[in-house]
Amino acid sequence: MATSTIASLLADRAAHIHPPLYFLLLKGWVALSGPSAFSARFLSVWFNTLLVAAIYSFGRRYLDRRTGLLAGLLATLSPLYVVYSQEVRVYALLPLVYLALLALVNRLSRAPHNSQFDWLLLIGLEVVGLHLHYILILAVVYVNLLLLLRLWRRKHELARWLASIAVVALFCLPWAIAVVFNWDAVLADVGVSDPFVEPVPLDYFVRLLWTFQWSGLTAAPSLPPLHSASLILAGLLLAALVFLVADARTRASTLRLLAHWGVPLAPALLLWQAKPLSHPRYVALFAVALLLLTGYALAQLGRRRAAGRVLAALTGLTVLVTSSIALHAWYCDPHFAKDDVRGLAARLEAETTADDLIIAPWQDWSLDYAYHGPAPIIRPDPADEPATWSALLTHAGAARRVFLVNYHRGNRDRRGLIPFTLESAGSLSERWDFKGLYVRVYEPDRPVVPPALAPADADFGPLRLTGAWVEQNPPADTAVTLALRWRLEEPVGDRYRVGLRLRDLDGWELAAADAYLLDDRALPTDRWTAGEEATTYHVLPLVPGTPPLTYTLSLGIYTTDDEGTVHPLDLLDAAGNPRGQSYEVGTVILAPARGVRSDPYRVIPDLPPLPKPAVLADGLLLEAAALDRQTVAPGQPLFITLRWR
């Protein structure tokens, strides 16, 4: 992003959920220092180094020198700021902006007469903040409410305050217009959260925010020592707050600092309800007020009698322990290590040629910093199906091999459009796993062509199958691909799934796959509108050893309740009467197996090995065997699975 043109940068940001100013700053910085990962990250180091001085200055000026020193020390040791000093992101700059806004509020509300320069400085800072990250809206609203409360009886200053709001709105208007013109793209970007993720419980949300602001680690609640230390710290700080609020000398400052932290943080609950997978770094800027509050508590309690000094010592020690555990986890615990993009890039450099193609996740540019091999990298957006088909038609068809990169933690292509396309034009040959990422290696052997669906008519009541396409002649140790077109006849409140079954002519089931029915927005059926049509894409892996014969492919529609009970839909005839629960899509002829030695599809069953492998013929070894059931009635079939070498 920082190396693109200004025009393309602005156009990209207008269609996404982050404003452009940080990227423009980063563009200017890398133009001076170079585009290496080190120089790009060093910009964040500058900001957080300045934050240490800024938080000391704020504490000394508006509280006392000891508070400033302690708050500065806390910021220096804070794992949150250590972590985000190493990220090429805006989050190291945001606490500086919030602290500067609070300082200006104090300046404007305490001075009897304010100069125009002070108001212009507030306007400029608010405009800068709103163009850095939209989360600054919470900070801007909060500081303006503070100004309203403090200037209510000063009519002249209140008029200036109203004028400042108008000027900020005017300066933000051009970017707001640009966002409105790209509103559909922005909504698509906002709406990429997983619809299957449940809303975050309030208690988990509170624990996550608390531990994150003291550790900088989203997985901190999963580390028992860190979780325990942060909970002990919460209890000690709560006791310290009670101690300070009870004293009239420290009550006002304590409540003011608590408000600076908690009030703008509270609306974050709505953000997490809308997007449960939102990252807590979005509200990490308010942690600077928490550090000031903690520094003030330590400074004031340290001046008290024995009980206060003991509480201060315990609180300070717990902060140190919490920070030490978090920093040790960040630097030494593999569980908290960053995704191994460098290891993946090194493997790609060793494997790829100029005739290969790499498909990276949409909007993820991290691979470009680490990969310096000859293969081109593309990033199709699966949410834009026509553009994805166009990109794959242009690049994948001519490639010798295609390397599809994805993250374990989330996949924007929930419909499986890209794997379907690559599988239907070839087959999966390998799978590599790295920390946080995996790569699927495909070997195309025919052109990439969108499937031509044949008409179909299967009435499942609220859902109707109107078209189908089934791949023919796939090798028997690869996978069968199929595309299905659906129409929702009436609104439903259930999230329906499709069950695909591959059976031989005797009815034996040899392969199965189940998936939610998702439309082109990757939304399940309870979010579809009546009359909506959607095409779903499926890959049905075949277990090695499947004979190259003719098979039937059938499907059924079902939903499950909270207990996991399956509720299938009936297949209806023309009169609306049930005629079973399975529809035969067509037949599939499998070609002879390629002889794949690995298990890239991860479908080989984990069979219990025999106590001793049995040599049944020269060069033929029986290694494992399993029955599909432990008891069998007379006349009942028994399925046996054998693994040979």
Image: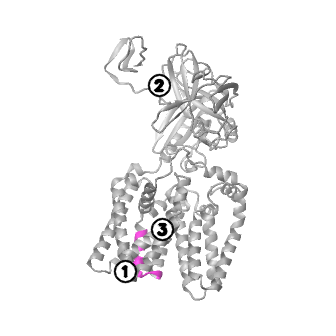
Tell whether label 3 touches label 1 (CB within 8 Å). no
Q: Which residues are magenta?
A: 61-75
Tell whether label 2 touches label 3 (CB within 8 Å). no
Element under label 2? Answer: loop
> In the drawing, does residue 231 fall left or right of residue 383?
left
The residue identified by callout 2 is: 597
Mark 2 or mark 1, earlier in chain: 1
**Distance between mark 2 and mark 1 Cα atoms:** 74 Å
Q: Give the label, 2 or 1, closer to the camera.
A: 1
Vertically, is 351 above or below 321? above
Point out residue 94 in the picture as x, y percentages from the top left corner.
Answer: 54, 66
**Residue 210: within the magenta?**
no
- 553, 353: nearer the viewer: 553
Quadrant location of the C terminus in the rendered image: top left
Mark 1 or mark 3, earlier in chain: 1
The quadrant holding residue 243 is bottom left
**Distance between mark 3 and mark 2 Cα atoms:** 58 Å
Mark 3 or mark 2, earlier in chain: 3
**Residue 66: within the magenta?**
yes
- 241, 531: nearer the viewer: 531
Element under label 3? Answer: helix
Vertically, is 203 above or below 445? below
The quadrant holding residue 389 is top right
The residue under label 2 is which amino acid type?
Arg
Q: Main secondary structure of the magenta part?
A: helix
Q: Is residue 400 visible?
A: no
Instruction: Please tell me how crowded label 1 is: few (under 14), some (14-19), or many (20+) other residues with Cα within 10 Å.
Output: few
The residue identified by callout 1 is: 247
